[in-house]
Amino acid sequence: MTPTQPFAMPHSLDAEKGVLCSMILAPDIIDEIPITPEYFHLPAHRTIYTAMRELCASGKPIDFISLTQYLRDQKRLDKCGGAAAITDIGTFVVTPAAAPHYLEILREKYILRLLFISGSEIMQDGCDEAGEADAKLDAAEKKIFSIRADAAGEKNTVVHCKQDVLEAINQIELAYEHPHGIVGISTGIADWDAMTGGFRAGEMIVIAARPACGKSALGFQIAARAAQQLAIPTLFFSLEMPGWQLMQRSILSQAGVNIQTRRDQMPGKNDVARIHASANAHAAAPLYLDTTPGLTTAQFRSRSRKAKRNHGIGLIVVDYLQLMRATNVSSRETRQTEVSEISQTLKAVALELQVPVIALSQLSRAADEGKGSRPRLSHLRESGSIEQDADQVVLIHRLDSEKDNPTEQPYNTILILAKQRNGPTGDIKVNFLPQYTRFECRI
């Protein structure tokens, strides 16, 4: 809808500049701001915002210089008022933290403009005596409801069930067509796959354990296998370990080289050959790492979306949940509230991007109480929201003593499938090889 008198419309040029400047200073928030170019009253600002979205979608850096050059290359710089217009936005001193305040002003002015335009159209329609009054009233209602939907960035969420019925039948047929019942991403652990059918799109899977029980090793083992053997583009967020350490451990593990031996002595010729082969397999795989410490929920959402656009990501792993920081929780809120937002964000991203999200998590100290005691869902650290949001919860239970494993079975670890939203729960017996930091199916 284009107004006949733009200058008379409600607007705030300062708020528009504030939002644009915030986006240039902190490009990660672009995907977190649910607006369209129409939110900006000034045509130049609409053009600038559109260019920023295009740069973001292409994965190119966004700053004042690159934005100016991009607009110049696209022959749109003159429409914005030249380079001076971009410089003018840069002189509008803001901090990205103020973006929500400017955005709210922008949204209010946009709603008022829509109301002005719709009100004018409703008034003109009402003055025209041709046509039925009920039809005109229905049209007026649609205009008002449309304003609310546009302003909130809402989509039509009420749809007929037919499409979901077709998808349900498709999933049922897939289960019958696969003899081993794996319709999602395989874990590489046969008993686990048999119980779950693999990890499906939109699921949030939590792997939890006490420190030094191998949750990071298991998470990366699943990620590396998905990328290498299944050719699934995989994104691994490591919040406590640098990328080269992850690669070193995984390369040696797959090469079958004892990590402690590698530290104490030079590897033999056979070891070197296996290490090179493993390194080449890792380098060729569609495996992507983000090792940002203190990752926020906004950064996680934005970077996951970008990776989905640019690389077609099919699996996301986060190591680990409690090291993330919530964007929308103030320092006055409890840690439980913050972890709840983190958990909800992980599940929301899984649903939005239609990929499985594996979140590694710590268990509380209560899981250590009592010799040989098994971890429980109640031991999930800091938030019951993790259990609520997760589609699967797997607890790693190490059997490190004769009391824990009196019959000397050929396994030393139990993966306790404590929750599965759409299937059975139970124990998965595996063997953890600490010298290779690798989990294997029981013999």
Image (cartoon, rainbow, N blue to C red):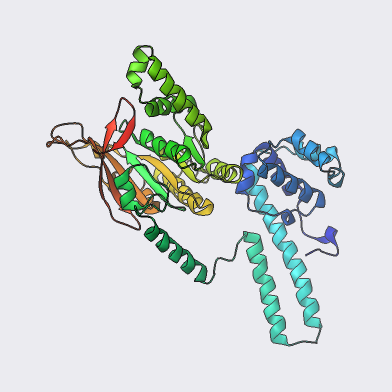
Question: Which image quadrant is residue 118 in?
Answer: bottom right
Q: Is residue 334 visible?
A: no
Q: Is residue 162 visible?
A: yes
Q: Nearer the viewer, residue 99 or 171?
A: 171
Q: Nearer the viewer, residue 28 or 91?
A: 28
Query: Relative to residue 256, is residue 244 drawn left or right?
Result: right
User: Residue 430 at x, y = what percent?
Assistant: 26, 39
Residue depicted at x 33% and y 27%: 436
Quadrant (top left, top right, bottom left, bottom right) of the N terminus: bottom right
Q: Nearer the viewer, residue 340 or 362?
A: 362
Residue depicted at x 67% and y 80%: 138
Query: Relative to residue 112, is residue 358 drawn left or right?
Result: left
Quadrant (top left, top right, bottom left, bottom right) of the C terminus: top left
Question: Which image quadrant is residue 271 in?
Answer: top left
Query: Relative to residue 436, is residue 124 drawn left or right?
Result: right
Question: Which image quadrant is residue 159 in?
Answer: bottom right
User: Residue 357 at x, y = what percent?
Assistant: 45, 46
In the picture as drawn, the residue positioned furthest to the top comes out as: 265
Q: How many marks?
A: 0
